[in-house]
Amino acid sequence: MRIIYGEIEPGIRIGKYLLGSTKEEILPRLEDYKVWERGDGFCIYSFDNFKLWFGVNNELEQIGVTKGFFGTYNSVRIGTTMLDIKKIFGRYENDGDVYIIPGIAGICFELEDVDGWDELTAPIEWIFVYKC
């Protein structure tokens, strides 16, 4: 199962997947997934090109999309570089394993690990929307 298109709204949703929705509202519509469970109710459902993170309260806390997803947020999409982010938003910050845009909560990016990796030119591999 894949997400091809959908609106990206930081801190709110990607496509039809709304943060705060419950597993019971989402999972009956989905198939062909792998699930990782921590044991306390926290779990991650993995699909062909997206992942859903559910908290211990069974609510959707984070959504991630990768290659094969063609939606955008202010022209940012899978494959956009941090150089592009800098041109569009003025700046960005490295927050450990992900990159964020200061002043825009609820969205972050993970870069692809490519040969000759450079922070500015490595393409975005994952876009994550999360609860703030």
Image (cartoon, rainbow, N blue to C red):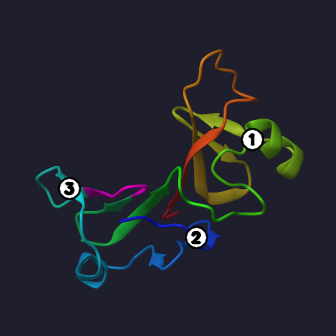
Residue 6 location, quadrant: bottom right
Q: Which is more foreground, mark 1 or mark 3? A: 3
* Gap in angstroms between the C-alphas marked 1 and 3: 32 Å
Residue drawn 63% across the image and 59% down it: 105
Measured from the top left, where is residue 98 in percent x and y?
56, 39
Check disc 3 and report the residue beneath it.
Answer: 35
Q: Secondary structure at mark 1?
A: loop
Residue drawn 67% across the image and 44% down it: 79
Check disc 2 and report the residue beneath it.
Answer: 5
Of the image marks 2 and 3, the number of the one nearer the N terminus? 2
Measured from the top left, where is residue 100 in percent x and y?
65, 46
Give the quarter of the figure containing the N terminus. Answer: bottom left
Q: Are marks 1 and 2 in contact (CB under 8 Å)?
A: no
Of the image marks 1 and 3, the number of the one nearer the N terminus? 3
Apparent side of residue 65 relative to residue 85 in the rendered image (left or right): left
Q: Nearer the viewer, residue 48 or 42?
A: 48
- Furthest-left residue in view? 39
Q: Amino acid at mark 2?
A: Tyr
Check disc 1 and report the residue beneath it.
Answer: 92
What is the magenta range?
A: 44-50
- Furthest-top residue in view? 116
* Gap in angstroms between the C-alphas marked 1 and 2: 25 Å
Apparent side of residue 95 relative to residue 85 in the rendered image (left or right): left
* Gap in angstroms between the C-alphas marked 2 and 3: 23 Å
Q: Secondary structure at mark 3?
A: strand
Q: Which is more foreground, mark 1 or mark 2? A: 2
**Label 2 crowd bin: few (<14), some (14–19), many (20+), radius 10 Å:** some
Residue 57 location, quadrant: bottom left
Q: Amino acid at mark 1?
A: Tyr
Q: Amino acid at mark 3?
A: Val
Q: Nearer the viewer, residue 56 or 107?
A: 107
